[in-house]
Amino acid sequence: MSGSGLLAGVRVLDLSLLGPAALAAHLVDFGAEVIKIEAPSGDYVRQMTWPIVDGISLMHLHINRGKESLVLDLKNPEALAVFEELIAKSDVIIEAMRPGFLDKRGFTHERLRKINPAIVFCSISGYGATGPYRDLPAHGVAFDSWAGQVNPVVDADGFCRTPDQTNIGITAGPAFGAMAVLAALVRARTTGEGAYMEIAQSDAAAYFDWYRIESWKAYEQPADVVTGNSSDNFERRKPGLGGMWEGVRYQFYASADGHVLFMASEQSFWKNFCVGLGREDLFELYPGSKYADHARGNIELQEELRRVFLTRTSAEWLRFATENNTTIAPVNTPQTVIDDPQFIDRFTWTTMQQTGCEQLMFPLNVAGEEAPIPTKAPGIGEHTDAVLQRVLGYEPQRLAALHESGALG
């Protein structure tokens, strides 16, 4: 149970399985008290995915860190009565599993409002509560393949393979859901009116890529309505890379020890680069347009820049960019980024002792405040008695009777 942070004093009931539990994890990071309500069998995320750290999955250790685990067998009438009491004393309910789980147990929107008019309810699921895929079971990559974010690759033997990728839906869905919960909490605290919301991880994967999707929609408009940029004579290019494949002043280049990303598409940054190099001749020869000019298809310039960038290391090019106010960025992998000096400056790691493995803290800095350090992700039912004593004031006799009835597993 957290006692500090921006959400100190907010109580969340988290009915979650697998990755969607990350929604409530964001609220933990802000200091909310999050009670993870589990069936007697528990959330099998503890055994899912890898790496496994001391017998427990990294996914569980991260997305359920800082939570308390309370076992309630919601098929048991006495457990349902306990759950109703918890709703009355909470601020948020997260249903992070297939939509309709609580409906089937009698906790409809109407009943939740009757129990607690200010309750904020948010359901997060794979494909959402509506649509033809509503009941289709799926895992994380499915939301990204549906949204057009990842496509199969074919190996040398002709077999389709899943490429290395950033999982968007299972990350963006909980983040967008947490944002919505916070907005609803503001209204609930202001007016006393709760909210009943749902979000899909597939929807989040698509909305995360709104720019490309909207660009394709815009491309369907007539040529006299939607054009290209003035820097390349208003040419209408198909969305997606939008000409960046042929880009020269906005492109990757090999350095002496790796790669950098060059992004001098504004004329001022391009001029600063050339002047800093002592190569004003490049600017005079290829001045380009004021904005959004990638020098697309200029192979002569690209060959010259390829030779130039090989003369310095990536770190030297970053210092050059800072000193000359031009646009050069580092290029990392998930393995190398943790040693990047910017990453080291900005991120804080938890320790093995604190959270069971080293984990990244939420990347937010609040002036004058220290972020609450989450506790290790709980074992199944680890806090059952303690939560019911603290939140509902149950005496030992009441707890013993509930255990005897099977309500607590």
Image (cartoon, grey):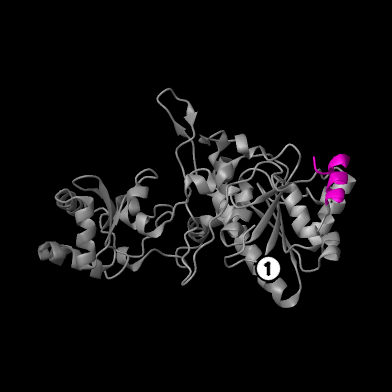
Is residue 401 one of those drawn in magenta? Answer: yes
Q: Is residue 134 visible?
A: yes
Q: Is residue 32 left or right of residue 152?
A: right
x then y, percent, for residue 229: 36, 65
x then y, percent, for residue 292: 32, 65
x then y, percent, for residue 101: 78, 47
Is residue 140 one of those drawn in magenta? Answer: no
Where does the C terminus fall, quadrant-wise? top right
Residue reaching furthest to the top: 157
Q: Is residue 230 left or right of residue 366?
A: left
Residue reaching furthest to the front: 396
* Magenta segment boundaries in residue numbering: 396-409
Residue at numbered disc 1: 184
> In the image shown, does 213 or 189 lie closer to the viewer?
189
Q: Kindly identify the residue that appears in the image at 81 percent across and 68 percent down.
A: 117
Q: Is residue 148 visible?
A: no
Q: Kindly identify the residue that appears in the image at 59 percent across and 62 percent down.
A: 31
The amino acid beneath tag 1 is Ala
Residue count near mark 1 (Cα–Cα under 10 Å), binned few <14, some 14–19, many ≥20: many
Q: Kindly identify the residue that appears in the image at 65 percent across and 63 percent down.
A: 181
Q: Is residue 81 left or right of residue 165?
A: right
Q: Is residue 393 above or below residue 69?
A: below
Tag 1's secondary structure?
helix
Where does the N terminus fall, quadrant-wise? bottom right
Q: Is residue 53 left or right of residue 183?
A: left
Magenta span: predominant SS is helix
> In the image shown, does 277 or 149 lie closer to the viewer?
277
